[in-house]
Image (cartoon, rainbow, N blue to C red):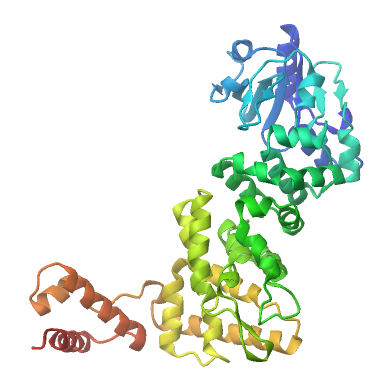
Amino acid sequence: MRELVDLSPVLTRLGARFTAAGFEVHLVGGSVRDALLAAGSGGGRGTGVVPGDLDVTTDARPEQVLGLLRGFASSTWNTGIAFGTVGAEVDGVRLEITTFRADRYDRESRNPEVAWGDSLVDDLARRDFTVNAMAVSLGPDRTVTDPYGGLGDLLAGRLRTPGAAVESFADDPLRMLRAVRFVAQLGLTPVDEVVEAMTSLAPELGRITPERVQVELSKTLLQHSPRAALELFVATGLADVVLPELSALRMEIDEHHQHKDVYTHSLTVLDRAIALEEADPDAESPDLVLRLAALLHDIGKPATRRHEPRGRVSFHHHEVVGAKLVRKRLQALRYSKDVVESVARLTFLHLRFHGYGRGEWTDSAVRRYVTDAGDLLPRLHKLVRSDCTTRNKRRAAALSATYDSLERRIAELSAAEDLARVRPDLDGNAIMEILGIPPGREVGEAWKHLKDLRLERGPLAPEEAEAELRSWWAARTGT
């Protein structure tokens, strides 16, 4: 394994510096794991380059680490020093150097009782999974330490804990969400013991702060193929604790896609949205907003389910209810305001396309579609196309052709009008001058009326806009 890790000059110099001072120092955890994956999952001849920031462990105490880095690192930071971690940058390489730990957990919170350790093997024993419990010495011997079979698990695609999974997850329930993420990120399959422990301890996830849950959920969604991870998330009951709206979709049958339930449909929409996103050279990728919207766009269906005559099921206004549920859940998970509002708006708009039949879109409808979507329009295009998951090839082709037609209409109208910035033909100052009124609520109402006219009829000549404004004012004031 040591041949697979390309020890950069920075690590070689760091090792020499610590060894000369009488300390052990090792590349550890995810840095070793990722180096092995870069080299061909530990079995081929890949690049061997250690990706990303580097994790290092040592028997030196934090204050000793800071002393050894003085004059060696261009900068250091000690935000994690209470947990034994010193950050440093050397020749543009970022390092996190952590003292051996022998922590204990109180199991009422995920905060450990920090205790320094004296043994590398003991330090590795407290780590979350065997694939993260490997180390390579940075000293001249380049000793490999893999006491829990992490390399074998990496080769076999297994996800195991160094000790008993129940004990590991009881110590830190966040590890269960990390297991979910590693399914997506590394393509590993958790062994039965891990799945059983996740299932039995799922309620313990309630001890974890929403911010930490959100970080792990986001990291999972941002992987190339998160579907299997999300299925584990739901099957083990973890979703019931932190995202119950996703679990609730399993029992609801979608009236448009009666061959599969809404839960399966939502995962398929996510798969399709990721494919469209990754194929678009102009799109941000990975796109958290689009992926959250694809996953959650139908979460209003359980609350709006109605049984209709002849065995049909309806979900009227589920997009309205869904937008409210999305906003509430994402706020609870401490997502930023921009993310919350963007995902909620996409959820609210995702059915708009289906309201226009076979493509009988007026200019007014096109303007409102573009204006309501705003800068979310490219994402809305991808979401709507992804939502058309029917297996009926003729229907799928018709839906695709209809949406192609809509996009052409948008392009044509955009070439004639600035749809990205639809404004009334008269601004607030002109409104006040024509009507002889001061700033206030009435100016805003007049502005909204003129904007509605602009959306309905397109650009108006100044004299026509003024006549419409005076007519509206006369009707409003009775003069």
Q: Which quarter of the rendering shows the N terminus? A: top right
Q: Position of residue 185 (x, y in %)?
A: 74, 48
Residue at the (22%, 71%) spot, across then down: 444
Indicate whether 149 appears above or below 226.
above
Residue at the (68%, 15%) spot, across then down: 116
Q: Position of residue 302 (x, y in %)?
A: 60, 70
Say if residue 138 shows up in the picture: no
333, 270: nearer the viewer: 333
Query: Which quadrant holds residue 50?
Result: top right
226, 207: nearer the viewer: 207
Q: Position of residue 9 (x, y in %)?
A: 73, 24
Residue at the (72%, 43%) spot, across then down: 201
Say if residue 301 shows up in the picture: yes
In the figure, is residue 259 to the left or right of 471? right
Query: Which quadrant holds residue 216?
Result: top right
Indicate whether 247 appears above or below 401.
above
In the figure, is residue 217 to the left or right of 332? right
Indicate whether 251 appears above or below 401.
above
